Structures are given as structure tokens and as C-alpha cells.
Image (spheres, coloured by chain):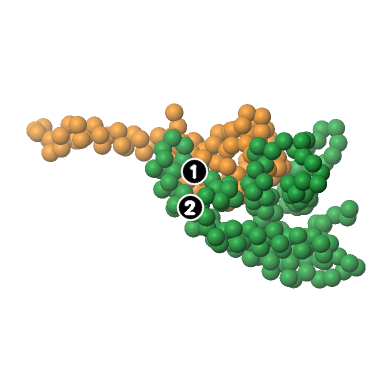
Chain colours: A green, B orange
Amino acid sequence: MSRAFRRQGDHIRMQLDPVEIDLLRSLRDGLRSTLDGGDADDPVLRRLFPATVVGDDAADHELRRLLYDDLLQSRLVGLDALATLLDRGVEHRGHVRVRLDGEEAALVLGVLNDLRLAIGARIGVESLERDDLDPDDPVAYRLAVMDHLAWLQEQLLAILDPASVAHYGRPGPDA
Amino acid sequence: MRLAGPAATPVKDRVQQLEEVADRDRPWDVIVWDDPVNLMSYVVFVFRRVFGFTEDVARKLMLEVHQQGRALVASEPREQAEMYVQQLHGYGLQATMQRST
């Protein structure tokens, strides 16, 4: 598989297959509507807006309430920015290319993480025994999607902060 | 300092006030918890961005989270601790704060 992200001078070129673009759009739309739904008991919202204070329920409630609007707003901005970036894609030999500046690349990294967290929360990844899954189980597909987004994240990290992947991003004896 | 004579505030209340001042000075610990989704490299990246840690410090703390389930990443006055929790939540890390013991 060709690399999805490549540094080009002070920019980063994102190159995705049309099927990846469709996948990102549908994941993005799904999370957007979950956030718009605002159901505090939804596992995705519980994961994206987690506990803040330990040992003091009143303080936890108060701080969560204080942080919620800002956190929600920045997540919505990220999701909408991703949609705009994908719209900006230019077709190139069967791929779609998007030119990102450093800030946009960091934003994509964060949105990819939110999308993975959302899938993980939806399928209950915390208590999942991956090895026991039937390959035809839809959950196995969701896990494969998470892995794919992780692979995209690792490539972005290698460009944005090479030190962060120094020993973990590469396959090999010390990975 | 004040002149000798009866205090305007009962002793009990003054002790209470003193404790509140001492309490305000006690720092808050910011803890990051392990999570099966966040990538190890991503956590290192976030630690470096949010706290400006060196690569070594960021990696050591990330491994502590990974192996021990949690790590103390900062000990700060309340407002600063809240800011860190907000930033870490923005990046999708599970971070909580509690009074330092």
C-alpha cells in the first residue's frame, strides 16, 4: 500500500483512495450526528467526554459541565474541517490528493483519533476478546477500520513529530 | 497582625478560613489512564505537545501508563490542572485530577 502522507516542503500531501475518502466521510458524518444527538448515556459521548475529578463527584460534575461546551465545539470544528479538506481533494491517477499545512495535518491526526475512539466505544473494545471473533462478525470489520485509521495516524505522527514514533512506528524487532 | 482584644470572627471560623487557604495551596495531581485505543506514539506526541516534555520523559510516562495503567503527569494549582485535563480530553486521552496527598 502506498503511503498516505508525504512531506512536501512545508506542506504535507495526503493521498487517499476514493474508498478511503468515502469511509472517512461516513465515519465523520456518523460521529457528527452522535455529537449532535447529545445523549449523555451514549458510550461514544461517555468516552469523548470522560471523568474529570476523582474522589469528588460534585467537583467532577461541575468541571465536566464547564469543559463540555469547549470540548464539544472543538470536536465539531475538527469534524467539519475534515469534511472541508476531503471536499478539497484533487483527483490524481485514481487517488485523491489533499494538500495540508501543519495545522491541518495536526487537526486530521486528532480527528482520526476521535473517530477511532468512537468506533472503539461503540463496539465495547475495552472488554472485547479480539482472538475469539469470527472474521465475518461486523465487529471484526470495525476493528479492521480502527487499524487502518491507526496506520494513517502513525504516518502523520512520523511526519509531525518523528520522535514520537522513534521506537514504535516501525515494524521490527523492537516494535 | 492586629491589636490585642476580642477577634471579630470566632476562632472556629478563622481556623476554617486558614484551612481553606492551605487547601487552595495544595496542588492537584493530573493522572492519565491507560486506554486500549490510543496509540503509544500518539500518547507520546500528546505529552510532548501539551507539557513540552522531552522525548525521554514523554516516552517514560507513556510506558508507565501502558504498563501500570496510569501515570502522574503533572501536579499543579487547581486552575492549571483543569487546563491540562481539558487539553488532554481534547486529544482524547483519559485524564483526571485529584487533590495531591
Quarter that holds the C terminus of chain A:
top right
The residue to which callout 1 is attached is A52
The subunit letter for the residue under badge 1 reads: A
Which residue does the image show at 84% across and 70% down from the upper left?
A91
Q: Is residue B49 left or right of residue A100?
A: left
> Which residue occupies the foreground of this view, A24 or B82?
A24
State which quadrant residue B45 falls in.
top right
User: Which structural element holds mark 2?
Assistant: helix
How many numbered discs sit on the rendered protein? Answer: 2
The residue nearer to you, when weighing B80 against A4, is: A4
Whole-angstrom CA distance, mark 2 to mark 1, is 9 Å
Residue A67 is labelled as 2
Q: Nearer the viewer, residue B19 or B65?
A: B65
Q: Position of residue A165 (x, y in %)?
A: 76, 42
Q: Position of residue B37 (x, y in %)?
A: 68, 43
> Is residue B92 something that shows in the picture?
yes
Q: Chain of mark 2?
A: A
Which structural element holds mark 1?
A: loop
Q: Is residue A157 visible?
A: no
A63 with respect to B85 (left or right): left
Q: Are marks 2 and 1 in contact (CB under 8 Å)?
A: yes
Picture layout, residue A135 above or below residue A104: above
Count residues near mark 2 (Cα–Cα under 10 Å), then give few for <14, some for 14-19, many for 20+. some
Residue type at the position of mark 1: Thr
Which of pointers 2 and 1 lies earlier in the amino acid sequence? 1
Q: Position of residue A71 (x, y in %)?
A: 53, 55
- Closer-to-camera residue (A40/B93): A40
**Coordinates of residue A158 in the picture (x, y in percent):** 77, 48
Residue density around tag 1, few if under 14, some if 14–19, many if 20 or more, within 10 Å: many
